Amino acid sequence: MHHMEDGTKQRTLSIVKPDGVGKGVIGEVVRRFEKEGIRIVAMRMLRLSRKQAEGFYAVHRERPFFASLTDFMSSGPIVAMVLEGDDVIARNRKIMGATDPAKADKGTIRADFAGSIEQNIVHGSDAPDTAVTEIRYFFSELDIVS
Ligand code: GDP
């Protein structure tokens, strides 16, 4: 097996949010990652309680949309994934598109499928430190294949 000597290999947390699961685009989201050579090294479906959604989005607790966001995130099943690859944090963010689908680049997941700035199909960690924290929120090291 080929071993890549690569200092920039990263992991990030991706979530297909309840709207994405409801719209039936889990497979399409996964396809877009795999098409770009991003590897999925852990995956699970679950439904967050309100408390768990509040914990996940704790950094946003002072925002006016916090109640609405955590209500939405606990409204149905989600699919959480660990993505692995070279520079995968930034690459995932690019594939996702801007938070507001009206501002997202053409061909991004959010431009193609999101209904609003809140119900925007996917989550992706925004930096290496948040990626570590967010992966730990859903996965044990034993859940991640290598
Ligand atoms: P992200 O990193 O692109 O997901 O964006 P943020 O970290 O800024 O926000 C987290 C999530 O909160 C977003 O993905 C949206 O679901 C939601 N959100 C962000 N901004 C707004 C807003 O202005 N209004 C509402 N209702 N939800 C928002």
Image (cartoon, helix red, strand yellow):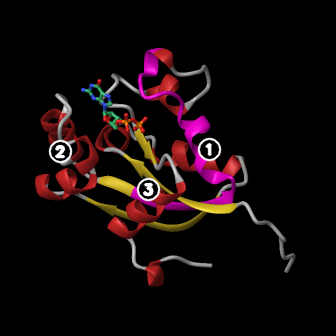
Residue occupying the point 46% across, 80% down: 141
Residue to which mark 2 is pinned = 75
- Place of residue 78 in the rendered image (x, y in percent of width and height, measured from the top left): 32, 52
Quarter location, residue 10: bottom right
Which three-letter amino acid code belongs to the residue tagged 2? Ser
Residue 70 image offset from top left, x and y in percent: 18, 43
Residue located 76% across and 66% down the image: 7
- Badge 3: few (under 14), some or many (20 or more) residues near its Cα, within 10 Å? some
Q: Residues within 10 Å of mark 1 (few under 14, many from 20)?
A: some
Q: Dot 1: what SS? A: helix
Q: Nearer the viewer, residue 62 or 119?
A: 62
- Mark 2 touches mark 1? (CB < 8 Å): no
Q: Is residue 55 left or right of residue 78?
A: left
User: For the residue marked with disc 3, what is the amino acid?
Assistant: Thr
The answer to whether residue 52 is left or right of residue 119 is left
Q: Is mark 3 within 8 Å of ligand 1?
A: no
The residue singled out by tag 3 in the image is 130
Q: Residue at x 39, y 60 (%)?
A: 134
In the image, is 98 to the left or to the right of 107? Answer: left
Mark 2 sits near ligand 1, with its Cβ under 8 Å away: no
13 or 76, which is in the foreground? Answer: 13
The magenta span reads: 80-102
Residue 90's disc number: 1
| Residue 3 horizontal/vertical position (percent) | 84, 76
